[in-house]
Image (tube, coloured by chain):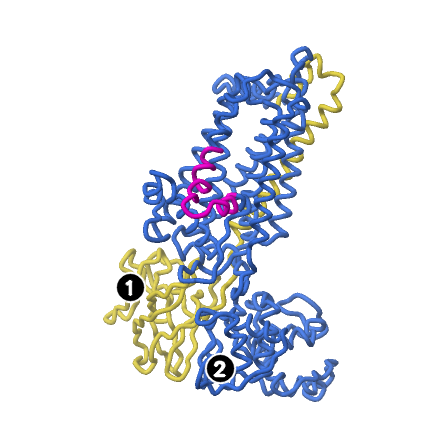
Amino acid sequence: MDDSRTAALPHETPGTTRRTFYVAAIYGLSALIGAALGLPALAYLLVPPRMRKQSQWAEAGDIRQLTLHTPVEMTFRRNRVDGWKVTSEKSTAWVVRNAGDQVVAFAPQCTHLGCAYHWDQAKTEFVCPCHNSLFSIDGKVLGGPAPRPLDRYQTKIQGNQLLVGPIEPAPGQIA
Amino acid sequence: MKPLNSLNEWLDHRTGLPTAIRNFLYEEIPASSGWHQVLGSMAIFLFLVQAFTGALLAFNYAPTPGEAYNSLRYILTDLTAGPLMRGLHHWGASMMIVVVVLHMVQVFLYGAYKKPRETTWIVGVVLLLLTLAYGLTGYLLPWDNRAYWGTVVTTKIAATAPLLGPYLTRLLGGEGSIGVVTFARFYGLHVLLLPPATTLLIGIHVYLVRKHGVAPAPGDELVPRKKFYPEQVFKDTLAIFVAFIILFTMAVVVRVPLEQLADPTDTAYIPRPEWYFLFLFQFLKIFPGSLEVVGSVVLPGLAVLTLILVPFIDRGKMMKVTRRGFAMAFVTLAAIGWTGLTAAAVATTPKEAGEVAVDYSAPTDWMQLSAEEMAGVGYFRQENCKSCHAVAGSGSTIGPDLTKTAIHRNAAWMIQHFKSPAVVRPGSSMPPIQLSDPQLNSLAAFLLKLNPDNATALDAAPQFAVEGALVYQSNGCGDCHKVNGAGMDVGPPLNGVDKRRSRSWVEDHFADPPKLSPGSIMPPYKLSRKDLDSLTSYLFSLPD
């Protein structure tokens, strides 16, 4: 409100202090109400939901089907928490068995713009069909616009089963 | 201030908005205006709070049966400030009814509906009906038992309306049964149709108040009028603030319960409407048999019609409120009638036999625990483990945090440790736990389940269930029965017993099993009243 103008109204002058109090109280109380509604609303919208406990590990497949240094695309089902729902969805991983029974499971998306890449057996490279990013068998960028090596699933081996967990960047990379 | 002034002028020149606001605020009002006229502003404020919290709830809500319930549970148990938002919306609805009715009573007592303010009054009556319609449609949206059965009754009442009944039923999608169609209609009404209608009518209502001016008290014409701003705006704001504090406190302190998912096959459920409809519910009971339609539709309809016609029935001159004896008497009688009917409805509401009041607005992770683990919660509470140990990072730091899975090792190690802590861990100051081996087993089983993610959720396990599990364990029920998949198969599994049997049947059954189920090899159990109660409540709270 334009105070200079309203304060000049003739019959208001005797009560100027009371008037100032009224105006201050109107703004002050309104601001308090606004904050008491607005701040919880922000928390409600922005704070991540409480994590619901569930196994993050999914069985990806039998590691006996893997031959040394040949990537295999494994498809499996894993649970994804989506708001109030837990949905089971199909996921894939490019799995490579290295010497000493070490297994690496790459996340199936190119680190450039998320296209699905594939293994080119002739060139022995991972090739992304979208913008021709190329990755080596250990996930390093060999060419194209990809900004970082392929992301990996956390892995565990139980008997002959490969278990995959959450996706994380390659070692030495910052998420 | 200079740039602000020129911005103001620019805006004024282009939109005229600052002048319009000034005209609105510096409206002249009668000298008699004051605290008794804050209720209208309060009602508008509460409407805005409802719109705000309603929109926020809708952001995390799936408006279809079943999903509605799950998404509301997600709001209540997984989201920060989710319970607050629902609390504000729930109690705000009740408060809005109260304020709207009080507003109406004030206008009625003062005779402020008289010529030329008849239309203002009529629009007000329609706004009251809209407010009630929000209550009616919103009641179904949580899709718990309360919501479902309450709406079943509502639609059946609508169906008894003379002539219109079948059409109303069809409109509400209530043909056959309450399901997806009714739900969609109620949701559509609640969020799509009612809000714009309310907004429009509030606009008309306020316009009419401005057009005719705030109703003056008799004799006011001779006293110089005053401005709406700032004194009356201050009074309105302060009243709104007090209302808001009450609302906020209720939303935080009084938990709005969520019952179990709507179950159309539940034969034990006793539906009750929201408190502000209880009087109608009770009124209905006065009219037996074929006269029912009089209580359900005819008389309430006539009451609304009378309310609309009030300004045309009372056409006398404005009088001082203190001389309006008839109006006073009418309001007093109405208040007594309303209170009497509501009290009678509350008094005749039976305690729900057979139902166990599990509050689904809190996490129910505890329901998945086996009886052994559940009894472990009991020993955990009895032995007061939390006086020395932190749980999920909060509490005492004398002992280690019990949610750290690394310290759990295995059950055998834990039991040794419970018995003689200092032997297993030299230097430990933990006193030995004086419990039997099976009891220590329970405690270990529970601790193995405990992790930082579920600690608070398991802490919400109600005491009746914990005590019931203790009785269950000490009587070795698990030697023959299964709970949540753990136990033996000699007797029937106990999950879902609440659907198969009544509470009294189960209680009698403990005393003499072969009498109630011939051929049963279950031995009789002589349980104390208290143990019998907790055990039955526990069994009835098990997930199906």
Chain letter for the residue marked with disc 1 in the picture: A
Predominant SS of the magenta segment: helix
Helix, strand or loop for disc 1: strand
Kindly identify which numbered label has been placed on residue A127.
1
Write down which chain is painted yellow: A
Between A155 and B281, the one nearer to me in the picture: B281
Q: CA distance from mark 1 to mark 2?
A: 75 Å
Residue B243 location (% of width, % of height): 63, 39
Q: Which residues are magenta?
A: B280-303
Amino acid, disc 2: Lys
| Viewer-nearest residue: B79 or B315 | B315
- Is residue A30 rendered to the left or right of residue A159? right
Q: Is residue B7 visible?
A: no
Res. B515 mark: 2
Q: Chain of mark 2?
A: B
**Closest to the observer: A34 or B13?**
A34
Image hue for chain B: blue
Residue B383 vertical position relative to residue A45 in the rendered view, above or below: below
Query: In the current view of this chain or complex, which residue is farthest to the left?
Result: A122
